[in-house]
Amino acid sequence: MVYLVHVQHPFNNYVYPAGAGLHTAAFAASSVVESVKKAQAEVSAKILQRAISICKQNMVRAETLIFQGDSKDEICKAAEQTHVDMLIIGSRGLGGIKRKSMNFLMVAFLGSVSDYCAHHACCPVLIVKPPKHIK
């Protein structure tokens, strides 16, 4: 079984004005909040649907999970909660630290998150770099 994980960044329904009254916050209308949440759900569904179709084409059983929060923390929590044997995480090479080899059952595509997961996940971690022509 492969767990395909997508982590959404939490939506703050408030903004701080840049003009006078810098110590006040303006809150977004509930329709804006719902619109953003709906858009996030659609993006997550689209990403995970593509991953599921790839798994089906290769006859791999897969389940999708969507979390909201800080990616690195949520991925490590998901690995622990699902009791996976290995965490597989993609690296776009955007982080400051690059490593030659890392120690596999989830997929995520983030930058320095992979380095955090390599050090904090409860299981072995495999970091997959993209092909050179994709960078």
Image: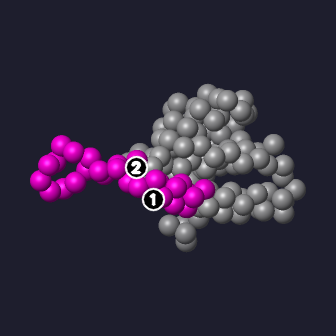
The amino acid type, in three-letter code, at marker 2 is Asn
Label 1: which secondary element: helix
Residue furthest out toward the bottom: 133
State left or right for residue 90 relative to residue 51: left
Are the residues tagged 1 and 2 within 8 Å (C-beta)? yes
Residue drawn at (53%, 30%) of the image: 120
Quadrant of residue 42 within the rendered picture: bottom right
Residue 85 image position (x, y, % from top left): 73, 33
| Residue of label 2 | 13
| Residue of label 1 | 32
Query: For mark 1, does the 10 Å Cα neighbourhood hold few (<14), some (14 to 19), or many (20 or more) residues?
Result: few
Label 2: which secondary element: loop
Residue drawn at (21%, 45%) of the image: 24
Q: Which residues are magenta?
A: 12-41
Determine the CA span between mark 1 and mark 2: 8 Å
Quarter of the image containing the N terminus?
Answer: top right
In the image, residue 50 above or below residue 126: below
Residue 65 image position (x, y, % from top left): 68, 45
**Residue 31 falls within the magenta-colored stretch:** yes
Residue furthest out toward the right: 59
Which is nearer the eye, 47 or 127?
Answer: 47
The amino acid type, in three-letter code, at marker 1 is Val
**Residue 24 falls within the magenta-colored stretch:** yes
Q: How many marks?
A: 2
Query: For mark 2, does the 10 Å Cα neighbourhood hold few (<14), some (14 to 19), or many (20 or more) residues?
Result: some
Quadrant of residue 3 within the rendered picture: top right
Residue 32 image position (x, y, % from top left): 45, 59
Residue 86 image position (x, y, % from top left): 69, 37
In this rendering, does residue 80 appear at all?
yes
Residue drawn at (66%, 58%) of the image: 45
Which is nearer the eye, 93 or 108?
Answer: 108
